[in-house]
Image (spheres, rainbow, N blue to C red):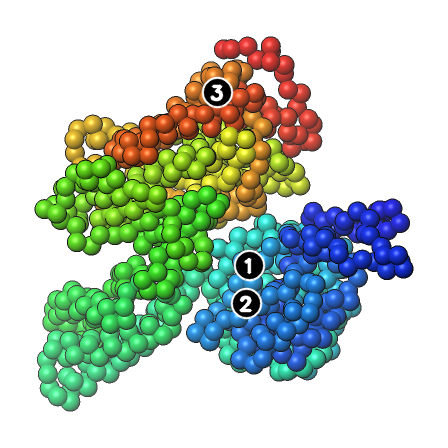
Amino acid sequence: MALREMGDEQQLDFPGEFVLPTEDVPASQDGAIESEVPAALARPVTPVLSIIVPTKNEAANIPVLLDRLASVWGLPSYEIIFADDSDDETPETVRAYAGTSDTSISVIHREPGDRATGLGGAVLEGMRAARGDWLCVMDGDLQHPPELVVEMFYEAAHSEADIVVASRYRETRTVFALNAVRRAASNASSLLARGLFRSRLTNVSDPMSGFFLVRASALDLDRLHPRGFKILLEILAKHPELNVTEVGFEFGKRHAGESKATFAEGTTYLSQLGRLRMGEDGLRFLRFLLVGASGFLVNALLILTITSQLGLHYLISAIFASWGSTTCNFLLVERWVFTDRSASNHRMTRFLLFFALSNVALAVREPIIYVLTAYLSVYYVISNFVTLVALTVIRYGFSDAIIWKRSAHKRLRGEPFSYDIHGIVSVNSEVWLPELERFLTHKHIETPTINVRINKSWFDAQRDSGSNDGSQFIYDEGFGPLGFGIDVSMSESIDIAATPLLRRSPHVLYTNVVEPILRWTFTRKGYALVHGACIAFGSSAYLVTARTDTGKTTTILRILDRQRRRSDRGSFISDDLTLLAADGRVLTYPKPLTISRHTVAAVRTPLLSRSERVALFIQSRLHSREGRQFAFRLASTGLPVATINGVVQWIVPPPKYHIQRLVPHSRVTTEASLAGVFVIERGEDGEEVLSDTDAIEILMRNSDDAYGFPPYTVIKKRLTQFYGSGLETTERSIVTAALTGMDANLVRSSTMNWSQRIPELAGIVSEDRTPYERPEAAQLAPA
């Protein structure tokens, strides 16, 4: 980090965008500085740094910590977020201090029922709320010296690291503040972690540190599922691509309060190591096996007792033994195997399903037990054991996928999921809409622009063609609640009532119903939802449009992946649809990307599990270009294609993943100014400069191409009739205003190498740092 002169002052160059105000501060006649300093200068709206302090009963330490942070010279603009699990006065102490400070200080207090994830989970909550480009996590007990934060910034700037770990073991720094037992435990924990994650922790001497600085854009918070208080290890294990460096420090003495290191935290840490090493599912299956082993002991004891002591036949004894062990197993599975899940089924429902599964398994096991015992002379206890083991994998799969099925997202009973799209359009939905996940808000929306609900009593006899004034229309394929049907009512807002099938198939609900309605709703608000991927270099955005299934997704992913190590690398805005304003602004519309095996092969380090990669073999074929073309052919036959589509996508959901799962180091930009348009086509290699008229026409045609699947024709007709046929004209005028005078090029390729040519045509420096000289328009003669 360097010092640069600013008039009579000096400023520290920190990583990130941080500039001290250069305006002259007015002085009073006696030379004192006036107090009327503009709020934007005195307290920056967006801080460079967010300091996250996990706390649990640290009330006595808060004032001292905040005083020391306030006295640190050289910090950039920062906010402090206390992620609190306390039962004492810590939250009140923080709020009292915040009322007297110019620094943005806030507290996120979790109630006892929300603390199952430990302080690591509290830190994650703080990270989600943070606004800074950099996140600093430090303890609130003053064992982590606040003064070191500046040194960590020095190191980040010097090394261009993504994460800087404050290490207790680097160089000659020591941990004398710990007693001998805790030092031994700390050393053993670190050695164990480094042994299990040798490649990922090569340059990390203290993976157990709770003091670190990390670039916010380098983290994918959705990957993190911490338990306990060792979140750094979780970050390093889940983000192997991070560039890590360290600074040493001397671990201080606790100022007040009690240590949070307990035997329970130790066992949680061991569980965390197992989960990270084996994967959550691997560790869960191991626990399921251990529960099964304990159940076998119960089962064997019962079958032996009932047969030998009560004289019942061993097949009868196996029934009672199975019931007894099933009850014990359920209690253990509920408390130990799936305890971290917010299951979608009620507890009694889970028990009945688990009991029914056990009885179905018993019906399968009984004949096998009889054959093994009666004909092969196997001891009946051994026969019982063999059948239990043989069915364990099947029972686990059913338990995982059905009985303890994950509830997609927590919400209060009866409360809808609310989505706020850039403050332009809001959506309330009874159904989780994964395509709008990035717009999810926890604020209650009283009067949404669009309201989506499920009509549980949907029957053909009750349906008609809609209202006489055109404010309501119905599309129903005639299968009642088991088929595809929507009832749409329009006024200032739009109410969508859907059949129960669409609760099970949210991708179809969104893509075939909500998105077409959003298209024309955005038009009413003055924006065009156009069919095009978008990437930004700095503040300049480039729209990439094409017919469906040409290769936009692969092109965007390759551009981002090729430039991931560059400081001026591109930023992701959208993949499939982009919001376009008449003044040329583009707003992100970050739906999860629909991918194929070929898409995954195009990038270097996609974060997909083995099971997700295997599933792609089926998903890619079903949701491929050929699959969609087949669906459109079905639509022309008059078959209930929307219902078929809903059932198919319920059984085999499309492979959709957010950008950070595919290109882990990618950045997302919310808004940028359109600087150019690229139309990509497959064909003989060549480039062609497009006129404004051609560029506008192609973008409009491609946008229409993105829709067309039933019931889009009905939706478009009814919305434009009710809100005015001028909607289509308005959308075109928005696109025309945005694209007029804009550089536009048609880029054809026989090898799909658009990811190399687009940055060059945009004048972006290539990976070898050599600028590309863009040809004059005359050189780009039409092919």
Q: Give how far across and how far down residue 420 sits, in percent.
A: 44, 49
Query: In the image, what residue type sits under mark 1?
Result: Ala
Left or right of 152, for residue 434: left
Look at the numbered disc 3 and give the secondary structure of its residue: helix
Q: Give how far across and how far down residue 256 sits, in percent.
A: 67, 82
Q: Give how far across and how far down residue 650 sits, in percent.
A: 27, 48
Q: CA distance from mark 2 to mark 1?
A: 9 Å
**594 versus 167 height, above or below:** above
Of the two numbered discs 1 and 3 on the same chain, state the one appearing first in sequence: 1
Residues 211 and 71: in front is 71
Q: Give how far across and how far down residue 702 sits, in percent.
A: 40, 26
Residue at the image point whose x is 65% and y is 69% from the top: 99
**486 versus 739 height, above or below:** below
Residues 681 and 206: in front is 681
Q: Which mark is residue 86?
A: none
Residue at the image point whose x is 55% and y is 77% from the top: 86
Q: Tag 2: Cα neighbours inside 10 Å, few (<14), some, or many (≥20)? A: some
Of the two numbered discs 2 and 1 on the same chain, state the one appearing first in sequence: 2
Q: Which mark is residue 129?
A: 1
Question: Outermost residue toward the bottom?
Answer: 309
Residue at the image point whose x is 48% and y is 66% from the top: 274
Say which residue label 3 marks: 695
- Residues under numbered marks 2 and 1 in contact, where contact means CB atoms less than 8 Å apart: yes
Query: In the image, what residue type sits under mark 2?
Result: Ile
Q: Which mark is residue 108?
A: 2
Query: In the image, what residue type sits under mark 3?
Result: Ala
Look at the numbered disc 1 and give the secondary structure of its residue: helix
Q: Tag 1: Cα neighbours inside 10 Å, few (<14), some, or many (≥20)? A: some
